[in-house]
Image: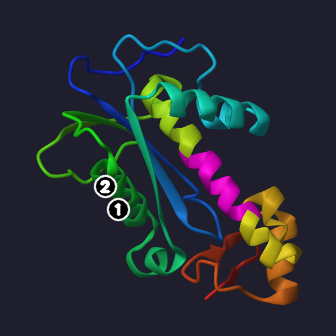
Amino acid sequence: MLETCFKKNCNEAGLDEAGRGCLAGPVFAAAVIFPDDYKNSSINDSKQLSAKKRDLIRLEIEKNAICYSVFKVDETTIDHINILKSSILAMHNCIDMLSIKPNHLIIDGNYFIPHSDIEYKTIIKGDSKFLNIAAASILAKTNRDEFMAQLDKLYPEYKWKNNKGYGTKDHIDAILNFGLTPNHRKSFKLKSIQLSIF
C-alpha cells in the first residue's frame, strides 16, 4: 500500500499531470489533499490501472479527499511556452483552486517551479509511492481522457478516443492523410518518421 503523504499535519497536496507526451490535446494537472490517516489499497499510479478501474477509483478520490482540483492548459499555450512550463502552469492553477491552502506539496517527477511560499519536494515515480500523487495522476488522466473522447466526436479519423492524442500509428497515419486539426500541438515533431507537424 502506498504512503498517504510525505509530510503529515500540513494539508499536503500531491500533484501530477497527464498528457505531456501527446501530439494533440491539452495537458491536464490535478492536486489532491487527503486526511493524514487515509488509506486505500486500490489507488496506484494511473498507468498501472485499467480505464474502468481508474473511473471507479476517481469516484472514491473525489468522495474521500479533503479537497482536490483539476486544470488544463491548451495547445496554443503549450506551443507558446513549451510543454514543461505548461504542465507546471496547470499545477500552479490547481494549487490556487484548492479550497484549503496546502502547506506542503509533493510533485511527481524531478522538476518544479516554486509556487508562492509553499514548501515542496519533487519525487521521481512519486505516483507509485504516495497516495496523494497517485490520486492526482488518476484525476488528471481520467479528466483528460474524457476531454479527448469529446474531441474524438469532432475528429473521429484521428481515433483520439482510443489513443488519447498520443503518437500511435493510427494517429500518425491520420495526420499524414488528413493534416492537422486546431487541437494539434504545432511545436511537436513526429520524430519516428522525421516529419515536423509545424
Please state the extent of the stretch shown in magenta in the rendering. 140-149
Secondary structure of the residue carrying numbered label 2: helix
Total residue callouts: 2
Say which quarter of the image contains residue 154: bottom right
**Amino acid type at mark 2:** His
Residue at mark 1:
89
Which residue occupies 61% across, 35% down? 58
**Amino acid type at mark 1:** Leu
Q: Quadrant of the N terminus?
A: top right
Q: Where in the figure is residue 68, as x and y percent of width and height?
A: 42, 40
Measure the C-alpha gap from mark 2 to mark 1. 5 Å
Q: Quadrant of the C terminus?
A: bottom right
The furthest residue to the left: 117
Mark identifier at residue 66: none
Which residue occupies 85% across, 65% down? 169
Q: Where in the figure is residue 119, as x and y percent of width and height?
A: 17, 37
Where 123 falls versus 130 (above or below)? below
Where 79 falls versus 124 (above or below)? below
For the residues labelled 2 and 1, say whether their Cβ atoms are less than 8 Å apart. yes
Q: Is residue 155 visible from the viewing direction of this image? A: yes
Where 119 falls versus 65 (above or below)? below
Is 47 situated left or right of 130 in this image? right
Which residue occupies 43% across, 72% down? 82
Q: Where in the figure is residue 197, as x and y percent of width and height?
A: 66, 84
Which residue occupies 20% across, 51% down? 114
Residue at mark 2:
92
Is 70 situated left or right of 106 in this image? right
**101 in the magenta segment:** no
Q: Where in the figure is residue 164, as x and y percent of width and height?
A: 73, 59
Say which quarter of the image contains residue 194: bottom right
